[in-house]
């Protein structure tokens, strides 16, 4: 994919196609290119043997934009990367988060015994920029700000995660689509004899890849959390590819971390 001088859209219903913001781009020597992906703005300046990169969050704007040559704001602080073998090529890639995300539904809900529910949510994605090769990473940052949170039964047992609000829709048609977020299909099964309260969900984002459907909407593989009959353990399964609802999906990035397809953990490690 080759960049164009300017491309811009606003967020739209899931049924309307939108352009892919990732791919390969060329940056001319002594030029500064700019990308805006939702709230994130990125500036990349190319010199003969050097790349300079800066980024900032500019509010809640949901636009996509790319400018091939702009003037960077004077207040920006650039990180410098020396590159003896000069190249004009950059690659932009959407990535999953580098930690689990704890998603708190707007409204907590209860799942009755021997019931199953599919919950639709969207999760923020990261932007990775590489120059020349996949190992030359210039930037790896979230496209929107996230807070840190601790998830676990106490302060000594658990894991540092990111925190994110979600609408946790039961009807996918009600889920608003954003180019800088990925759709996640979560199936929760309650095999125990008591109802389970779902107030917070720990989503294993580093173990998920990203897929793009024919309209360039991003998806993660489906995740299933199954509460064991004794009510104390959760079996977590990650599907092999994108959900069937992602039409003509192709994988655009791999998981940051691999894990076995079936994981059994204490229930407090996944749901609260």
Image (cartoon, grey):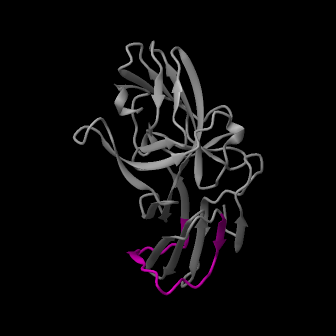
Residue 247 visible? The answer is: no
Where is residue 98? Give x, y as percent: 41, 50
Q: Does 248 sit above or below residue 137? A: above
Q: Does 214 sit above or below residue 262? A: below
Q: Residue at x 67, y 56 (%)?
A: 20
Furthest residue in direction right, as rendered: 16
* Residue 86 is one of the magenta-drawn residues: yes
Q: Nearer the viewer, residue 33 or 86?
A: 33
Q: Quadrant of the C terminus?
A: top left
Looking at the rendering, the stretch of residues picked out in magenta corresponds to: 63-90
Where is residue 146? Give x, y as percent: 45, 56
Where residue 267 sits, quadrant-wise, is top left
Q: Is residue 148 left or right of residue 34?
A: left
Furthest residue in direction bottom, as rendered: 74
Residue 2 visible? The answer is: yes
How many marks are shown on the rendered structure?
Answer: 0
Furthest residue in direction left, as rendered: 156
* Residue 81 is one of the magenta-drawn residues: yes
Q: Quadrant of the N terminus?
A: bottom right
Where residue 266 sits, quadrant-wise, is top left
Where is residue 246? Give x, y as percent: 67, 38
Q: Nearer the viewer, residue 182 or 193?
A: 193
Q: Residue at x 71, y 57 (%)?
A: 19
Q: Nearer the viewer, residue 242 or 61?
A: 61
- Secondary structure mainly formed by the magenta segment: loop
Where is residue 258? Give x, y as percent: 40, 37
Q: Is residue 60 left or right of residue 46?
A: right
Q: Does 20 sit above or below residue 35? A: above
């Amino acid at each position: 994919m080759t960049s164009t001088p300017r491309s811009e859209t606003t967020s739209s219903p899931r049924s309307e196609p939108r352009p892919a913001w990732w791919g390969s781009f060329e940056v001319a020597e002594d030029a500064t290119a700019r990308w805006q992906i939702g709230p994130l703005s990125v500036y990349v300046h190319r010199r003969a043997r050097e790349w300079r990169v800066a980024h900032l969050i500019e509010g809640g704007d949901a636009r996509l934009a790319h400018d091939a040559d702009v003037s960077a704001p004077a207040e920006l602080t650039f990180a410098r990367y020396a590159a003896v073998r000069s190249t004009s090529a950059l690659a932009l890639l959407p990535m999953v988060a580098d930690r689990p995300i704890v998603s708190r539904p707007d409204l907590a809900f209860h799942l009755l015994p021997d019931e199953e529910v599919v919950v639709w949510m969207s999760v923020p994605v990261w932007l990775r920029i590489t120059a020349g090769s996949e190992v030359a990473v210039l930037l790896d940052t979230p496209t929107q700000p996230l807070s840190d949170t601790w998830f676990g039964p106490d302060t000594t047992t658990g894991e540092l995660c990111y925190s994110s609000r979600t609408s946790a829709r039961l009807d996918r048609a009600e889920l608003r689509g954003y180019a800088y977020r990925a759709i996640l299909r979560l199936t929760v099964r309650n095999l125990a004899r008591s109802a389970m309260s779902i107030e917070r969900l720990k989503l294993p984002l580093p173990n998920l890849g990203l897929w793009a459907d024919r309209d360039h909407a991003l998806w993660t593989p489906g995740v299933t959390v199954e509460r064991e009959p004794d009510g104390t353990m959760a079996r977590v399964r990650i599907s092999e590819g994108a959900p069937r609802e992602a039409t003509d999906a192709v994988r655009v990035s791999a998981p940051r971390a691999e894990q076995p397809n079936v994981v059994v953990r204490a229930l407090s490690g996944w749901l609260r």
